[in-house]
Amino acid sequence: PKDAPAENNELFEQELRKANQEMVRENYAQALRSFNMLTLRYTDEPLAHLGRAKVLAHLAERQQSNQRLWEAIDAYKRYLAFEELITSDAEFIAAGESCIKHLRFLGNHHQAVNIHELLIERSPGNPHLRNQLSLTHLMANNLRQVEQVSFNTLKLAPDDAVAQLHYGLVLKQLYGDYLQALPFLKYAVESEEEGTQEPFFYLALGETLQRLSRQPEAMQVFSKGVAKGFYTSQYQRSLYNVPGLKAQPFWEPHETGYQRHLEKLQFHWRTIRDEALELLGKTGFFEDEAEQLRHKGVWQQFELFSQGRRMGDNCQKTPKTCALVQQFPESSGCRRGQVKFSVMKANTHVWPHCGPTNCRLRAHLTLVAPEPKKTLLRVAEQERTWREGELFIFDDSFEHEVWHNGSLPRLVLILDMWHPELSSHQRRNLPAI
Ligand code: LMR
Ligand code: MN
């Protein structure tokens, strides 16, 4: 405290220096003991709490412990609560940003937002701090908040590339307004400024160009993404990848090692179809695709397994299908995919898009397809259609696009399955998608 006796202050400085040295020497256990003591003895010294926060964060990293990370976050918050006592803006902001980084890592975007607001209050004219807030909203997929924050940042700093980028993303993703989105996305990505060079943003710009029928420019953006190491290839643009997995647009059943399972499902296709059709006869079970992938038309799905988990309520409505799929654990247990019925009505076009990961293959078991000549699936540069009772397999990390130009609905069972080259360790430990 400011009015503490001088020698007391000096003693604190000395002990603080010692504790900091222990931290620099990566002697974290000892440093933590020292900082624990400092925070007890000098409760009102912000730097004691800041040092403790940093040590705890180091320990969390070393021990791979979320518990420790939460302790670090608490310590950062104690430090930040001294607000008025902290004279250095830079130090205050750096601590806040560390705290935010940890909260984002733990997926607690709500708490992160509170810290962002504290930082913005401290330095309201700093667009970087506002961009960081909108990035947290983006990570939480709160597009309305991204819109609000980035719009306000642009009032403050109209040329800010990151704010333009975030605002452009909202125009594309929330409103499907590709014409308005384009200049924002293009300016930002081409600026190459920090915070704009991410695979996801190149994808957004390229897709926007595709949706405006500017295919050659889109391909240029994607190949720049390949050059930057963002994507495996121009056509394979999934973002969550295990490197080196065999990659081709279409697969034959015998290439997967799952042939026996696939044949069994195919053998029972009429049973599966009948369950799906009964469900389709009722309203309110199939849900619209909700990722702005539809250009026009009707495309709905009913999930049976998601991220390797059985959807209990849904499976009650289609028990035979779920029982069959459950005998194929590489599919029902695929934590990077889903099993679902997918119905597509006539006059539907699905924009070119890529799935999120190269860790799965996607089988379509065709249940209802009265007009094979009027429907089309393009994967990279290859095309196929659907034929009742047949099954095909594609890798949906490759760009694919769907047209239904007929007049009658098409119904398929989609089965994602682990990429056959993934080890059982990987299948158990890869984070779900
Ligand atoms: C896709 O995976 O995007 C489509 O093939 C799904 C569908 O229903 O055709
Ligand atoms: Mn798809």
Image (tube, rainbow, N blue to C red):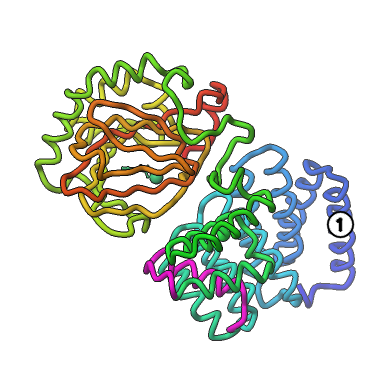
Tell me the element at label 1: helix
Extent of the magenta region: 158-179
* CA neighbours of label 1 inside 10 A, class few (<14), some (14 to 19), many (20+): some
Q: Judge by depth and name the residue closer to the eye, 239 or 129.
A: 239
Q: Judge by depth and name the residue closer to the eye, 427 or 102.
A: 427
From the viewer's perspective, tell me whether residue 31 is left or right of residue 302: right
- Callout 1: CB less than 8 Å from ligand 2: no
Identify the residue position indicated by label 1 in the image: 15
Is residue 151 positioned above or below 378 on the image? below
Taking the spot 73% from the left edge, 54% from the top edge, the residue there is 54
Taking the spot 50% from the left edge, 71% from the top edge, the residue there is 182
Per the picture, the main secondary structure of the magenta-coloured stretch is helix
From the viewer's perspective, tell me whether residue 240 is left or right of residue 323: right
Is residue 431 positioned above or below 129 on the image? above
How many numbered marks appear? 1
Give the residue at the far top of this rendering. Answer: 260
Identity of the amino acid at label 1? Glu
Q: Position of residue 387 (x, y in %)?
A: 26, 32
Taking the spot 89% from the left edge, 68% from the top edge, the residue there is 7
From the viewer's perspective, tell me whether residue 6 is left or right of residue 322: right
Ligand 2 lies in quarter: top left
Specify whether residue 162 is painted magenta.
yes
Q: Judge by depth and name the residue closer to the eye, 101 or 30.
A: 101
